[in-house]
Image (cartoon, rainbow, N blue to C red):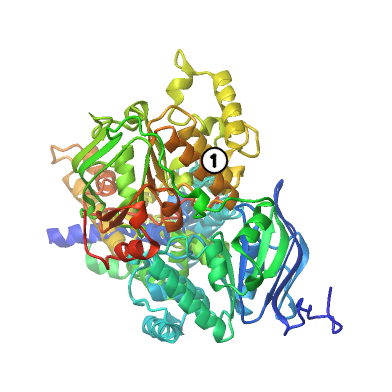
Amino acid sequence: MTAPDGTTPPTPDGAPPLAVSLRGIDMSFGPVRANRGASLDVARGEIHALVGENGAGKSTLMRVLSGMYAPDAGTMTVNGRDVTGWSTAQAIDAGVGMVHQHFMLVPTLTVAENVVLGREITAAGRLDRRGAERAVAELGERTGLVVAPGRLVSELSVGEAQRVEILKTLYRGARILILDEPTAVLSPPEVDELWRVLTHMRDTGDTIILITHKLDEVMAVSNTVTVMRRGATVGRVATRDTSPAELARLMVGRDVVLAGDAAAAPQHSIRAERRAALDVRELTVADARKTHAVDGVSFAVEPGEILGIAGVEGNGQTELVEALAGLREVSAGAVLLHGRDVTRQSVRARGDAGLSHIPEDRQLRGLVLDYSIADNLILGQQHRFSRRGAVDAAHVLENARRQIERFDIRPADPAAPARALSGGNQQKIVIAREMGRDFTVLLAAQPTRGVDVGAIEFIHAQLRNARAEGKAILLVSADLTEVLALSDRVAVMYGGRFAAVLPRAEATKEVLGAYMTGASGRAA
Amino acid sequence: MMFLAFLSQTIRIAMPYLFASAGGVLSERSGLIGLGLEGYMLSGAFCAALGSYYSHSPWIGLAAGLAGGTVFAALYGLCSVRYKGDQVVVGVAINLLAVGITRFFLRFAFGSSSNSPRVPGFSVAETGSGLLALAHDPMIWMGALAMPVVGWVLYRTPFGLRVRAVGEHPGAALSVGIPVARVRWLAVLLSGAIAGMGGAYLALDQHQFTDQMTAGRGFIALAAIIFGRWDPPRVGLACLLFAAAETFQIRLQGASAVPAQFVEMIPYVLTIVALAGVVGRAVPPAALGKTDE
């Protein structure tokens, strides 16, 4: 499929030459085929959204484009030039830059050092620090990406770190910018700021490829959408000609109930017992720098209720959940489960008292990646699966088969290592372990982070079912849509405290957004 | 006079530590554990003796020592960078191999299982312990410069910035087109060369090679790196501190109620204290030892 001159593939609508054209890309990692004949056409000067479920191969395809992997098969052209199998250095030279989902920044170096790394400014063979800082400041002024060049990256907020990532690619002369899930960690104002920068870049002729799960973002900023499913491209549409529902259907291959739809809004269910299942009183948690990460927070969650905690990451949510789960020392205050004080009790004792915990980082806290699915499914529950001091293998296997079936974990092989699974299926293991047993209180921290639409739908349904069964659920999520879709009440955490606790009816994105940035005063 | 003698002895004792830990800092900041320092030094010491013996020139001996350390570092790099072996296992193996190989060649080249014949060294006054005698030994100057030079390279040159990036976050370095493996190779080879000079100092200072003559100095250098929190100026001071403690112990020998073994423990005790966070937290390079990813 090439134009008469043999170099430039035509765009579907006969517009100017394509910025990027990937054709028939195959990419395997051992037995896993991440891309199978995937293709992508991106016109110059557009924001192109690349959407698909987790494990659909979007990130892999973009890593191929940015030179991190050489494809097993297929052709790649950039600005009409054949670049199949190029290196990262060649991609950077040709103006292709990627902002990764997990930031590729060295925390012990300064902003300027990170930006110039690999393309250092030198004076007589030595590093020219001042020159680097000046270059970064100038670039920041020109694009609106302002960060103090002399600060250490470890001191930056997530939003600032992302700006550094974008600056890094621009410093290298990127005209084609790939962003992998850029909004996953940003607050609504930071997201707006990002869109402003990106649309400005597009309007000055740059090309942007945006990998995302969030369909409202796709609708808001993109010009064109490419949908991937199971490693292959299944559709390419102009954004104005499509709808979130259609995109979701293309991604999953069937109809999906989207979070935020009216049908999915929280319904109040039976509350058999009015007494708080989880009662937190004046909880204070110190962080590594001896300041209060959680500063005197009090709240209660009743059976049959979901209390959602919204907030920009780094405002104490992580410390709060870890303190409740028993992973972090509490400096003052109390945690009560069904009226019983568990503040000083171990994780296991809390678990036996009915507490389940879906940790925010499944790879760090939730799973042992090299363990099998079956072993991961009993982590922390070993004492329930052992006989006379030895693990009862038959019982473990039986449990694994049951949970794999109930939670639709794929592959359905109890012996497969967790590492081999997609993010969504890894998360299902955690969900199955924590929700597939007897519990009364659930701490769900970022339960759908980095998980595809199909799995999000499934996990949300599990949470709603649990509420209907009278479980008390504390939901912490950086995704406002998720908090609003599930919660009965919404608390906003800012600076270690609850800036507000609102009934669902009063909580809108605008109101919450103001509290999240500290713009609205402190209440409750 | 007492003090000057103490000082000059401390400097001589510190030399091998300064060389080895200067090399070690470079290697560790790139993410490669300096567990093979002992081996590089031993190999450097033997090659230095061999070179000096046959050429009658300590300069040739020094070059041979440098090469000897580099060869063992290359072996370490081959196993840990190229084949992504576990660095601890590889490091231990390198050290054991160095002991065996130097012993084998000691017998092969010199027909002895304990020591080489006398070889030419640098020092002018052989038994002099004055500072003036030290100043005539070019290796003293090299040893004094090794750590500042490594510090300058790490903090003031593009290569140093890359070494630090690779040791903290190799993924980030890779994503901006830095050849991570090549940077590590360079760092480890340089570390072997510098540590090999430390071994050469030992052999040339004593005018002979003796079996296992490094006697754990590579590990003390490693302890100094940790105690100095991977920061060249602090590591240099740690080397001097450890050397002073050792001098103290030697001077007190016989006259002291404290058994020598307790003084010999000082570097290790201090390192444990440092690791326990008493003098500020010792945070190693984040990617240290993780080249298998």
Give how far across and how far down residue A241 sits, in percent.
Answer: 66, 71
Q: Is residue A100 visible?
A: no
Residue A110 located left or right of residue A344:
right
Tally of numbered discs: 1
Q: Is residue A455 left or right of residue B265?
A: right
Q: Tell me the SS state at disc 1.
A: helix
Q: Is residue A400 in view from this perspective? A: yes
- Splitting the image into 4 quarters, where does residue A325 fall? top left
Residues packed near mark 1 inside 10 Å, few (<14), some (14 to 19) or many (20 plus): many
The N terminus of chain A - image quarter: bottom right
Q: Is residue A70 above or below residue A240?
A: above
Please give the residue where the numbered disc 1 appears in the rendered image: A428
| Residue located 29% across and 33% down the image | A274
Indicate the position of residue A511 as horizontal and vertical percent values.
33, 63
Q: Residue at x 57, y 67 (%)?
A: A218
Q: What amino acid is found at the position of numbered circle 1 in the picture?
A: Lys
Q: Quarter of the image holding residue B111?
A: top right
Measured from the top left, where is residue B99 in percent x and y? 49, 43
Looking at this view, name the residue that lies furthest to the right.
A4
Q: Is residue B32 left or right of residue A488?
A: right
Horizontal side of residue A144 vs A262, given as left or right? left
Chain designation of label 1: A
Q: Position of residue A483 (x, y in %)?
A: 41, 52
Task: Indicate whether A508 appears above or below A238.
Answer: above
- Given residues A498 and A410, the one toward you in this image is A498
Residue at 52%, 59% (x, y): give it.
B70
Considering every residue shown, the one lying at the far top of the view is: A388
